[in-house]
Amino acid sequence: MPRSRLQVVTTALSYTELPDARACAAVRARLAGDDSPVLAALGALEPVKDHASLLEAAALLQGRWPRLRVLIAGEGSLREPLLALARETA
């Protein structure tokens, strides 16, 4: 992908605040259930984060990875539209 098409969205979370690997594995097992591939996004559900593109990309990948799971966590003005899009693309 050309650099001109990339956008970096920085996080306000310090890496020292991230949980350890065991905690991450436990959450993944609870939310994803198995060893399915997972795409995850955590952040404000606002246009700048572009979660819609993540959902659309995941829909395109379903043929290759039928067990692919998408986990999005956050709150914001796009919560309801993103839920609707997730239902449409599932």
Image (spheres, rainbow, N blue to C red):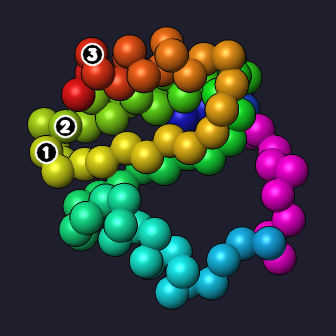
| Position of 26 relative to 1 (above/below) | below
Tell me the quarter of the picture where residue 44 sits: top right
Residue type, mark 2 in image: Gln
What residue do we see at 36% from left, 59% from top? 31
Q: Position of residue 2 (x, y in %)?
A: 61, 32
Q: Quadrant of residue 85?
A: top left
| 9 within the magenta span | yes
Choose between 57 and 82: the one closer to the eye. 82
Q: Mark 3 highlights which residue?
A: 88
In the rendered image, residue 82 lying in the magenta stretch gets the answer no
Query: Which residue is disc 1 drawn over?
Result: 66
Looking at the image, is mark 3 or mark 2 earlier in the sequence?
2
Which residue position is annotated with label 2?
62
Callout in the foreground (3, 2)? 3
Residue drawn at the location 75% of the way across and 39% of the way down: 8
At mark 2, the secondary structure is loop
**Disc 3 versus disc 2: distance between alpha carbons?**
13 Å
Span colored in magenta: 8-16
Q: Is residue 13 left or right of residue 29?
A: right
